[in-house]
Amino acid sequence: MTSTEIFDQDTVAKAQDLIGRYPQSRSALLPMLHLVQSVQGFVSQEGIDFCARQLDLSEAEVSAVATFYTMYKRRPCGEHLVSVCTNTLCAALGGEAIYRQLGEHLGVGHEEVAGEPGAPGSIMLEHAECLAACDLAPVLQVNYEYYDKQTPESATELVEALQRGEKPAPTRGAPLTDFKGAELQLAGFFPEDDEAYWSDVDGPSQTAETLRGARLAADRGWTAPVMEDVPLPEVEKK
Amino acid sequence: MTDPLTPVLTKRWLSPNSWRLATYEALEGYTAIRKALAGTPEQLVQVVKDAGLRGRGGAGFPAGVKWSFMPPNEDKPHYLVINADEGEPGTCKDIPLMMADPHSLIEGCIIASYAMRSHRCFIYVRGEALHCIRRLNAAVREAYGAGYLGENILGSGFDLDITVHAGAGAYICGEETALLDSLEGRRGQPRLKPPFPAAAGLYAAPTTVNNVETIASAPFIVNAGSDWFRKMGREKSPGPKIYSISGHVEQPGQYEAPLGTTLRQLLELCGGMKDKVPLKFWTPGGSSTPMFTAEHLDIPLDFEGAAEAGSMLGTTAVQVFNETVSVPWAVMKWTQFYEHESCGKCTPCREGTYWLAQILERMVDGHGTAEDIDTLLDVCDNVLGRSFCALGDGAVSPIQSGIKYFRDEFLALCESNKRELVGAQA
Amino acid sequence: MTMAPEEPKTETPVPEGHVKLTIDGEEVIAPKGELLIRTAERLGTVIPRFCDHPLLDPAGACRQCLVEVEMGGRPMPKPQASCTMTVADGMVVKTQLTSAVADKAQQGVMELLLINHPLDCPICDKGGECPLQNQAMAHGRAESRFVDKKRTFPKPLPISTQVLLDRERCVLCQRCTRFSAQVAGDPFIDLLERGAHQQIGTAETADVLDMASKTTSGQPFQSYFSGNTIQICPVGALTSAQYRFRSRPFDLVSSPSVCEHCSSGCAERTDFRRGQVMRKLAGNDPEVNEEWLCDKGRFAFRYAQAEDRIRRPLVRDASGKLQETSWTEAMRVAAEGLAAARDAQGVGVLAGGRLTLEDAYAYAKFARVALRTNDIDFRARAHSDEELSFLTSQVVGTEGVTFGALEKAPTVLCVAFEPEDEAPIVFLRLRKAARKRHAKIVHLGQWTTSSVRKTFGELLACAPGAEPAALAGLASHAPDLDAALAQDGAVILVGERAAEVPGLFSAVHELSARTGAQVAWIPRRAGERGALEAGALPTLLPGGRPVTDAAARAEVETAWGVSIPESPGRDTSAIVAALADGSLSGAVIGGVDPDDLPDPELAHRALERAEFVVSLEMRPSGVTKWADVVLPVAPDVEKAGSYFNWEGRRRPFDITLENTGALPDCRVLDTLAVEMDADLFTQTPAAAFGDLSRLPAFAARPAFAAVAADGTEPGVRLATWRQLIDNGSLQAGEPHLAGTARPAVARVSAKAAAELGGDTVTVSTDRGAITLPVEVADLPEGVVWLPANSGDSRVRAELGAGHGAVVSIEAGGAR
């Protein structure tokens, strides 16, 4: 299969749409590689060729970019991507145990897939760097939706559910779809149906930890100084 | 004196559907742009300068001064780029902000763009933060619908377009020039400076890169003025700041307090150390800021206070570790992070992190020697201030500070294979 | 660029545009914008470096060149990369010589560079000439403290047929990727991966799964300039497939030389060992090729080592076989045969376009003195009277446009000239002008070639043959360009195939006269400009003297002591035609391939018919079969001489390989002339040049005789030129080079491709047909492009046609 067979007219149209979003076409490369992943579930040589053609770049230039960023998978991903934060703080709070446990459970290592890649219930496992949810450590993500405050047990249950074809709701994020679906949104394409769109957007985002300071202040009656409408400073017109 | 907590940026977070336009408008949202668009760009730069707002991304450069570097003419298009590539270990403030109150960032973008005569703004969001990307996309969509974005905003004659752009997994893209290269569809490797972005940034045109929290502060400053802003915080570090407390504390979370708040005060707010296990070490603002210990409980956590005590304020990502955690192990984990995230452009950072990680791994594995500690410090010396960008400097912070405060623990590891201290015992 | 004088007390005035700073305690005045590393170098202080290269944009990546800097009395907190920091007034710089901090920083970086560097210097091609090795000795620690695991890679990876990549040795200075992206415009090599795993690679070497097993290949590193990456690699990471494991640098003898391929006249360094050239490197000549070479110049030298080199004279025996014989015998036979032919209907001389100035002069003089004829022409290609008039009136003896002028030109118009293929170093200058100074490069051609794209150029497209009309109408259809050509320094470059378009030289001349733009003629072959100066033309004597100008002729007659026919001789086509119809009896042919001539079929017939043919050659050619005497001549490396490059700049070179027994053409002709009772005084190249130089200067030029453009014949027009790497005979014996040739494809418009259908197209004339894979390009309708001499596409030989000819096209294989 050549890149023109793998990437259909709709994908070409989306690629062109991406190019139109930027003053210079090359800026569309990162989103376009996400788009490639939404079609293939990873970035292949054909995907690189596709981007190179769309953007009039050399394949080496596209390869240089595709191999720089960790979110571009260069081997077929599972239906789901499970990313466990094993950076220091999460690791100290159990993240490393979670990663170890999931690795044993799935029988895979970093960026390896349990099951036939892409098949229902298949899972690529990875250890991730800090996922910026340290107040909710240890965290993991499935297809970049947050599952906060995990334990080895809860994480195993989550993964088992994924393997069964279930889609447990994330702590923070939209209703779970799959890796390709997430990649399409990262490329900048969201559900066209209004209801589906807002259902995604309105997915939960605030845990007790997120709101702790604000809630504590409200409870104690602490506030910032009172805001009064003051005019903008006078400056000499240049 | 202000209250111990001063919710400004985090205040709306408590409201249901805080991310929706209707909520935002009900809570005085998009009032600041009316005022801003009625003023001049110079006035906006001035009020932000007067407020003393310093960059919230880590470096603390005065935002108003940065804005004033933009050329007054419009010979080339001007760009505002929001650095929403939050990834510094321990840092988790921008992502909750963008999820909970994306419109405050959008409103800040409009103000900042107007102040810098920019008609195009990009929000570069870390790719892993998919839910933020959704929320921002929805906020931008709503803002266009309500006439806050697009052509002739609120009849002011000012045009602005905002594009939400997803990254793809590279810590280095938090460095502003690497972010610009990445936004141009390249490998995210830092650029040579000069030229600085204000002269030749995105597409070689005048560009300002600001952090999310910085820009989200702008609407409040416009509305309430610089004096109000300066009522919080300290002389050289005014304003409120989101302290993200994580780790071995009872109540981790986001606490917005005046700059200059101490760890002792923060620990009181978050219920103290978890299970009362004593504090061992902590970072004031992410892993790139040299660690502190229990000696530093009363250091005012603002730009000057942290620096005077030998660290940096960074992103006020306060990671708290108790006595169960091995410092060499923690340092090794962080070093592995920097090794993984080094972009590879320059020798000291690329090769240095590779070497340092190996020495630490060997040490933690019980095969280190006392000479290795000297080698670690000397290699750190050869990386610090020698690398192309600040990533290299950040990479050696945990090692240098870890050895500074806990040399005995490194030595002990070398002498007697104290494996029981390796890793967390949580 | 002056340095501060010795006396420290006197205040040196700082010239406009300069600053004064202190380096290691020494005051120095430097031009604004100069990088510290260069200023220090001018003081004699070499700061170690890897990524820095004066012709590449500063990178600051390797951090090897750190120095301490003080500004306004305040030391900067960190050591600074001297390869990225520019000089400033009052700056105080301390290099490793005076700063312990700088010295430690440099040692530290060196140690870091070496932790992952393999200790395979004993088997590394670079060993002995390796900047890493040398600088590690000068600025590094004696021992490494690194005891952990080195990063390893499989070695080496071929990234093209010419270039091998050893990733373990790479220090990631990115000179190669920056060269390819910035200088050559061929970003087929780039950084891959990140951090400590970062490596140089191509799309093919990238660790990315190929679903369809190579349906989409991943382009290998295909560039006409890839060899430069090998030369500028500061370690042994990029090595040459041709040179790998062949020699040690300290076993080589190096000799400066000049490239024999195109008309750029690049400075080269030829390295040889035991009488064999091992490699060629770019010489450093800022005024010509800077520090670059094209791959043809670098790699195409094995023809001189070919098994079939003719080393001894050959004479055809009674049975019609060529037999080796002595020089004495061969000279006798040749002299007798030529004298007889001369005294019958006469002898014509086809000198070829690859001669040195000295050799060309010998042919020009031989024709007049020994053969008593003006029937001589160096143009072994399509040519015209219009071109001849242009060359003799506008080009000969001029020194106008230079490489430097191209770099500074605000506008350059390329007419019938494909810079990347025909004069690659000119192409690099045009790209540099466009990239650095935003020069406007306009190409009057047929499609958006890589020359157009990579010079950020603009295509002025027209059908072959319609170029004169396009130029004549410039003021109306491209008024911007017309005005731009009137700017100071604007240049028009005209190439070899202009001779195939009637009226084109006239249109160029008219445009130049109207706008004031300077014109330069850039022939494809190295010897053409020199042969023009030497008078190897039917209408021209040495020094630009018209044959028909009695005073001019008299000067030469006096110098040579002979009388010269006063009417112009036959040009190449006329010589061929005269041989074919018997109105000439014999020919002296130097390095000409009959298949290059305008009508190859006629040329073969002419040679067959000719009564006596003397061929001067290195290797058997299309002439050998018909030659009565074959006299072996020396390749460039085995003789001295000089080329006149397209600028009109003389590029002398000395002999590289001595005592091989091979003789230069001028010596062979000198002896032959003696045998015919004539004296050339060209026993050696130096003697030949001396003889030529003794002619007084001659300034008068005839007026250019303009020619009207052709009416347009209906039909599909052929556009064609030679690609740089093709079937050319001087590229023989070099498979690594041949492997990077651009594939031979035909190009047509999208509409034509759709109408033709299929993957191939057949282009034919009444002579023959060529079938090639078809590719779509933005060609005008009714135009097909073929590479002139690539693979199966031997246009002149197969079709008997050239640029502008009417051809027919049909779906491939239909015939």
Image: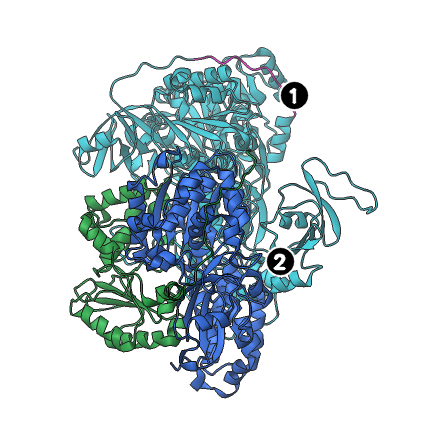
Q: Which residues are magenta?
A: C694-706
> Which residue lies at the image location 22% right of the left edge and 52% below the top edge?
A198
Q: Is residue C746 above or below residue B166?
A: above
Chain in green colour: A
Dominant secondary-structure state across the stretch colored magenta: loop
Circle 1 packing at 10 Å, graded few (<14), some (14-19), many (20+), is few
The image's mark for residue A186 is none
Q: Amino acid at mark 1?
A: Pro
The residue depicted at 44 percent of the width and 46 percent of the height is B223
Residue C312 at what x, y percent from top left? 48, 42
Q: In this figure, which residue is indicated by the disc labeled 1? A: C696
Q: Residue furthest bottom?
A: B416
Q: Residues within 10 Å of mark 2 (few under 14, many from 20)?
A: many
**Percent position (x, y) of residue B150?**
34, 38
Is C267 part of what is drawn in magenta? Answer: no
Shade representing chain B? blue
Quarter of the image with the N terminus of chain C in it: top right
Q: CA distance from mark 1 to mark 2?
A: 61 Å
The chain that hosts pointer 1 is C
Q: Are marks 1 and 2 on the same chain?
A: yes
User: Looking at the image, which is closer to me, B161 or B243?
Assistant: B243
Q: Is residue A57 above or below residue C629?
A: below
Image mark 2: chain: C
**Labelled disc at residue C79:** 2
Q: Nearer the viewer, mark 1 or mark 2?
A: 2
Q: Amino acid at mark 2?
A: Pro
Residue C771 appears anywhere in the view: yes
Chain (cyan): C
Disc nearer the start of the sequence (1/2): 2
- Total tally of numbered discs in the picture: 2
Image position of C452 (left or right of C74): left
Task: Give me the residue at 41% from left, 46% from top.
Answer: B109
